[in-house]
């Protein structure tokens, strides 16, 4: 299947553009639903439990194949999912954390599909050959019709594949999962029923939400900066002296549609600023309303058409909306049926893949500290050698799960430690007056004190500050009491003991976690989440400082194009300061030469993004101190920038030539070494 996908990558890319937009995506999950056929990767596979990911159990007993999720099946679907994501988004997944999450999610989905298949097989709902062939032909006809609706894409496909028949053959190959899809639909029809009365009841229950989601207005507008001019233009239009379209072309300051009769097209609630939206939705068709003042100026609005609902019956007249709501109800009921079916029939999982079993345990017990501690203990055997060093042979998935598990534990332990520490430090120090007050009254008094301190009356300021500190301590102490009680602490001695125990656990987990993140960082310096996590755990590592600065630079780059250098500094000042501080600390520290050069490269990129000559000059001077021979025209560029900053005419040496030469010296083909740049990670 993977070879087929690569071979026809061009067609698949066009199909994504053509079909994904209109919501027809069965082609892209065809291989995912091909379990009945086994898929090409599994055709020669020996179907043993040892080659599976998990075996479905019923009443504690293993079911026979095909009610197993095979390792090859999961691997094939994982590769397909990655390919589809990268083609649709143009980005790569995070190789550490996203990889594990996708595998776990796919395993759960395949497990559910096997259960649906089990129900189908035991209730005579398995599709016939004729049903599958008819459905396949119908889907192909629908796809061809949609492809032909975009003549440009259709011409590209014909040019590449030669004929419509060849395209049909390729589409037919991509639909190996139609049989399973028909099977799912058969089961869904058997176990779920949603009629128009159900839809009406849902509409009545969620009428306000439906209005916001589905109501639309098709309108034109004319934007004018002055109210008087807007009123004059409106009067001339209503008097027939001006046509609305002519007025838009002549007077509208919205250049995006002024020459198109001021057309805005269809828009929904939330698409426009509130004042404009309210006026447009309340206007009658062909009525000119306004001038309506917004932050942009004064608008004259003419509604050409509108779709609004006064009651639930109005919505029921819109068959497209009714069908969408019906499908949503069916999906919700189907999900509930599947959950009930699992429980009633006592289905379970017999895993043959440790890391996926551990992941399943983690995802279903994320707040159970005892389970997480046991999981951490078991993962330690995979992630560390007997001498306590991180295993360089361990699969990345185990490390990713270890990081997730220890993060959950740290969140709990650090929260408890904070409360126990406050309890211990404040016990016996809170005045009885405040101990006897309710929290609400204490907070009210605190607000009163803040108001008094903000006033001009400063006669009793010192006493107010003293009272504020005492009340703040009382509030803090009283807020810890429920936590202390929940932890089962009955005495100060027990609190001290628990505090020491929590401190020890936090330190141990933090140290181990940092060691694992360090190994992951050196394995995957391109993983944004690894870099961020390791930086949080060990911000003193100079290499991760630079890697984190690069991550921040990537984020800034997304906005640099349309915000501009000045606004970039305005909106992202703290982030820019963090980058500069990290770069400076690496350059000034006792670090390897190549690490310092890497920091300077990031600094020069930042200076270029911000169009900051002074910042660029400072980094070039640092470069001169570290390696004056690295750039042939380094001295002249420094002089040029100094003259420019001091108001002297620039030299003839263009910045572009310097940049090209500087980048050329960081390509890994010289004695300066290489500087790895982070790939663009998947979105978080």
Image (tube, helix red, strand yellow):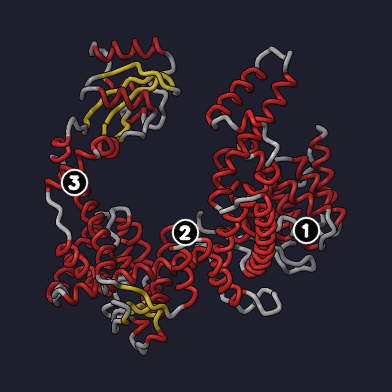
Q: Which residue is mark 2?
A: 90
Mark 2, secondary structure of its residue: loop
Instruction: From the top left corner, tell me how far across and down residue 444 is, in percent.
Output: 56, 25
Query: Mark 1 or mark 2, which is nearer the start of the sequence?
Result: 2
Horizontal side of 50 relative to 506 (left or right) equals left
At 19% from the left edge and 38% from the top edge, which residue is drawn?
A: 204
Q: Which mark is residue 597?
A: 1
Name the quadrant of the N terminus.
bottom left
Instruction: From the top left corner, tell me how far across and down residue 458 is, in percent.
Output: 72, 14
Instruction: From the top left corner, tell me how far across and down residue 214 is, in percent.
Output: 26, 39
Residues 282 and 350: in front is 350
Q: Which mark is residue 95?
A: none
Mark 1, secondary structure of its residue: helix
Q: Which residue is mark 3?
A: 320
**Label 3 vs label 2: CA separation?**
32 Å
**Label 2 vs label 1: CA separation?**
31 Å
**Is residue 170 in sight in this rendering?**
no
Instruction: From the top left corner, tell me how far across and down residue 284 is, in percent.
Output: 21, 22
Neighbour tally class for label 2: few under 14, some 14-19, many 20 plus, Cα within 10 Å: few
**Is residue 582 in sight in this rendering?**
yes
Horizontal side of 260 relative to 530 (left or right) equals left
**Label 3 vs label 1: CA separation?**
61 Å
Query: Mark 1 or mark 3, which is nearer the start of the sequence?
Result: 3
At 17% from the left edge and 42% from the top edge, which residue is drawn?
A: 201
Figure quadrant of residue 59: bottom left
């Amino acid at each position: 299947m993977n070879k087929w996908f690569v071979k026809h990558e061009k067609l698949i890319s066009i199909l994504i553009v053509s079909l994904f937009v209109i919501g027809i995506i069965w082609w892209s999950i065809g291989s995912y639903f091909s379990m009945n056929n086994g898929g090409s990767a599994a055709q020669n596979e020996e179907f043993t439990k040892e080659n599976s990911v998990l075996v479905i159990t019923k009443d504690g007993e293993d079911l026979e194949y095909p009610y197993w999720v095979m390792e090859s099946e999961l691997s094939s679907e994982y590769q397909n999912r990655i390919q589809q994501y990268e083609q649709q988004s143009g980005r790569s997944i995070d190789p550490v954390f996203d990889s594990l999450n996708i595998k776990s999610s796919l395993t759960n989905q395949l497990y559910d599909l096997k259960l649906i298949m089990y129900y189908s097989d035991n209730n005579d709902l398995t599709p016939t050959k004729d049903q599958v062939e008819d459905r396949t032909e119908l889907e192909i006809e629908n796809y061809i019709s949609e492809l032909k609706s975009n003549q440009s894409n259709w011409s590209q496909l014909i040019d590449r594949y030669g004929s419509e028949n060849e395209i049909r053959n390729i589409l037919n190959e991509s639909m190996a999962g139609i049989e399973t899809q028909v099977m799912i639909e058969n089961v869904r029809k058997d176990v779920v029923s949603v009629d128009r009365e159900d839809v009406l009841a849902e509409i009545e229950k969620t009428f306000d939400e439906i209005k916001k989601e589905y109501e639309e207005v098709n309108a034109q507008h004319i934007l004018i900066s002055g109210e008087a001019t807007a009123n004059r233009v409106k009067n001339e239009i209503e008097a027939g002296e001006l046509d609305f379209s002519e007025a838009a072309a002549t007077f509208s300051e919205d250049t995006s549609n002024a020459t198109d009769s001021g057309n805005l097209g269809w828009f929904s609630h939330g698409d426009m600023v509130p004042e404009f939206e309210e006026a447009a939705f309340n206007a009658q068709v062909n009525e000119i309303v306004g001038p309506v003042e917004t932050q942009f100026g004064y608008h004259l609005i003419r509604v050409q058409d509108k779709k609004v609902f006064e009651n639930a019956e109005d919505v029921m007249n819109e068959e497209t909306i009714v069908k969408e709501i019906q499908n949503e109800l069916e999906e919700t009921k189907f999900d509930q049926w599947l959950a009930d079916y699992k429980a009633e029939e006592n289905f379970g999982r017999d895993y043959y893949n440790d890391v996926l079993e551990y992941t399943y345990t983690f995802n279903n017990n994320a707040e159970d500290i005892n389970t997480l501690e046991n999981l951490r203990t078991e993962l330690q055997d995979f992630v560390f050698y007997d001498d306590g060093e991180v295993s360089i042979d361990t699969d990345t998935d185990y490390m990713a799960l270890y990081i997730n598990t220890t993060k959950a534990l740290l969140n709990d332990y650090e929260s408890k430690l904070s409360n126990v520490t406050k309890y211990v430090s404040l016990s016996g120090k809170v005045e009885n007056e405040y101990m006897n007050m309710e929290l609400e009254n204490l907070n009210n008094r605190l607000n009163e004190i803040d108001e008094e301190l903000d006033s001009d009356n400063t006669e009793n300021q010192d006493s107010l500050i003293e009272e504020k500190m005492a009340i703040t301590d009382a509030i803090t102490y009283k807020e810890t009491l429920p936590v202390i009680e929940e932890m089962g602490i009955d005495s100060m001695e027990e609190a001290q003991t628990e505090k020491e125990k929590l401190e020890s656990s936090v330190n141990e987990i933090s140290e181990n976690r940092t060691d694992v993140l360090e190994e992951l960082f050196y394995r995957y310096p391109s993983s944004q989440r690894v870099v961020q996590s390791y930086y949080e755990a060990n911000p003193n590592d100079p290499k991760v400082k630079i890697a984190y600065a690069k991550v921040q630079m990537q984020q800034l780059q997304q906005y640099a194009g349309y915000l501009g250098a000045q606004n970039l500094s305005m909106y992202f000042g703290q982030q820019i300061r963090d980058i500069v501080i990290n770069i400076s600390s690496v350059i000034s520290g006792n670090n390897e030469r190549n690490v310092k050069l890497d920091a300077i490269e990031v600094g020069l990129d930042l200076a270029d993004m911000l169009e900051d000559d002074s910042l660029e000059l400072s980094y070039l001077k640092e470069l001169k101190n570290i390696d004056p021979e690295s750039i042939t025209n380094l001295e002249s560029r420094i002089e040029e920038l100094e003259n420019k900053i001091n108001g002297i005419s620039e030299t003839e040496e263009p910045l572009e030539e310097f940049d090209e030469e500087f980048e050329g010296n960081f390509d890994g083909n010289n004695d300066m070494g290489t500087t790895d740049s982070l790939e663009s990670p998947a979105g978080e």
